[in-house]
Image (cartoon, rainbow, N blue to C red):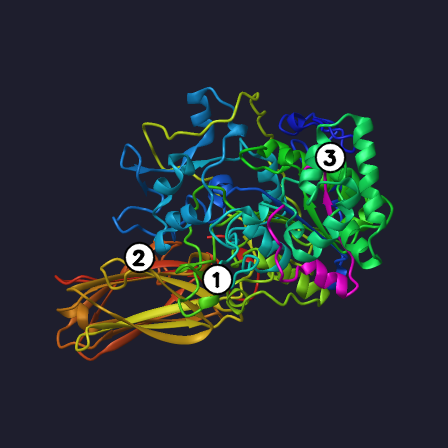
Amino acid sequence: MSATSPSSGVSRRRLFQLGAGGAGLAVAGSLLPPSVQQALASPPRRGGLKAIKHVVVLVQENRSFDHYYGTLRGVRGFGDRNAIKLRDGGSVFEQPGGPAGHVLPFPVRKAAEDASKDLQYIGALAHGWSDGQQAMNDGWNDGWIGAKSPATMAHYDRTDLPFHYELADTFTICDAYHCSLPSSTSPNRNYVVSGYTGFEPGSTTRRAIDNAAYSEDTHAGYAWSTYAEQLERAGRSWKVYQEWDNYQDNNLEFYTSFKQVMRKALIPAGGFKNLDKFYGKLAGLALAEQDALLAKLEQGVATLTPAERSLYERGLRRNRPGGLAAALRADIDAGKLPEVSYLVPSAADSEHPSASSPAASASITYQVLDAIASNREVWDSTVVLLTFDENDGFFDHVPAPRPPEEVTDEYFDGKPIGFGARVPMMVVSPWTVGGYVSSETFDHTSITRFLETWTGVRAPDISTWRRTVSGDLTGVFDFDRARRSHVPPKPAPAPKFVTRWKPAPPVNQKLPDPERGRRPARALPYQPDGSARFDAAKRTLRLDLANSGRSSAHLSLFPYAGELPKPKHYDVKGRRTDTIAVVGDHYDLTLIGPNGFRREFVGTTSGPAATVEVTSRIRSTGRVLDLELTNHGKETVTFKLTANAYGHGLGDRDRTITLKPGRDRTLTWSTGATDGWYDLTVTLNGPSTFTRRLAGHIENGRDSISG
């Protein structure tokens, strides 16, 4: 597409140079289209999901959450208090490998200065199934450097991505949204368009976990149904907006039903089995030759049946280069915007590290938002879901939820299919204004589940496990109250283009400094809890897990003293128990879950530490944590309670509690003054080691604030 859009009049470079005096903007220093700024001044429509008339899905290419938003204030980024430790005792941010023995996250800007390169144009890294599994390393999340190279740790910040950060500060960002599997674009986009990735054609064992479908001439096509076809059968309107170059990102073209339509339409054009080859040939021809070949395609389109023609026009037709946003605007102006729109940008606008840049993506996103907001009726009734299909090879520190081993349909070749690393998800709409963060667990099936909930049209192939673990995005919205948008500071200009390159870490490494501050947070449907008691006779640790929320909470148990060969995963709704064998003279386990939930269980198998217990119980009313301390042994013991953050829930100082044999005591840890947040450690005085760390957030059904 051209550097300047005829519909917006704003060049890509201009997006990164606008300041307080720029282009008559409604908000000084803002990079959002003036039409969006003006629309934000009005309160959103009421009516819940029924107020939504249009959903626009824009899936860009290959960026991880930490890579883009690790420094953003108030999200689970580089300042995460719930970051896991690795088996070597270091932080997950200290990834093993590299000349120094480990690599920390480092800024692209500094690497670009050192290399005299343009920070916008870094290159892609390995991002396939095998290296994705290697990076996650059985759930330990410590194989990134060997799988991807030290460049995996490169990250941007607000100065580099002012438009992206303004979207986060104005609307709602999701910091627990994962790609659907640790692999490449095509299988992840299968989840976007169908909620599923099944088997390769002609196989009952080979799962579609890579980009095999890109071989369009020989690939027979996927047989399961897309959500677009479900909408078609239900009589609901939908459309794909794309250009001649769609970077093979319209996965509908890889399904049998669409392949049949495509190949029938291409017959008069001769010699083409797929549209990608057709438009690739077209791009290299003179204008008259282009018109002649396009006329032959239209001859083929004319032979389609009405049902085939509908699939072609809605799912396969492509616009001329640079025409995606213009086509969207034209349909809006004509009152023809469908209920569901899938936007598939060109390679140059895709944000892919090999072919695009953050600046290019900011340009197409600007045009899309301007097209929508320029029609207030459409803006007032539209949701834009902006995410990324996968993380490329870029690091993310949050371990992905993984299916229990008994969920066999979520495994291929002995490896779990889901989830992959976190990717950014921005929800742009009148009902998501306010700079919120949602920490509910999502993956790409959440997009289709949102469409399900809104339209009532079911996607039949989403697995039971994913429906258990992933939300449907409805918790991101506030249909009852209007929120004012945040006004960001003036952004810095972007440097000039040089060439593509791979960032290298600096010699002197240090952890990034995330932005200070918190942000409003959406209420979550979870309330996890967990306790553990050691049984000396059986040499086992009994885990008592609980979740009183309305949705299942995914919890991950990390064993650091050889109790298990790899982390273990639980999906908890209500209560459940598990028994973990202790193999040596001590145990060391950490249980993590959504939104900063953490329980650490450390103890020795002899002495007083083997005969004491700490049990927790969460009460949403009053937002308190009850702690029951019990001495099952024959000696008097003294517990010490220490606040790690958020203030002391028992007062303004640490407390010691002495218990005689056979006695117990219950204490109430208040979080009313800390917006429901708590982080404390219970230890035992004396020679034996005993630690219980409890951290998390107490939900009360209302919006809150980030930790």
Dot 2 surroundings within 10 Å: few (below 14), some, or many (20 or more)?
A: few
Alpha carbons under labels 2 and 3: distance apart:
49 Å
Q: Nearer the viewer, residue 491 or 684?
A: 491
Indicate which disc residue 91 carries.
none
Indicate which disc residue 205 carries.
1
Question: Where does the image place residue 549, in percent across and percent down from the top left?
Answer: 50, 70
- The question of residue 367 being in magenta is answered with no
Which residue corresponds to mark 3? 26
Asked which secondary structure carries label 1, the reply is loop
Residue range (magenta) = 217-245
**Which three-letter amino acid code belongs to the residue tagged 1?**
Thr
Alpha carbons under labels 1 and 3: distance apart:
57 Å
Left or right, residue 442 beside residue 57: left
**Could you tell me if the residues under marks 1 and 3 are in contact, i.e. CB atoms within 8 Å?**
no
Whether residue 19 is visible to the viewer of this picture, yes or no, is: no
**Which three-letter amino acid code belongs to the residue tagged 3?**
Ala
Asked which secondary structure carries label 2, the reply is loop
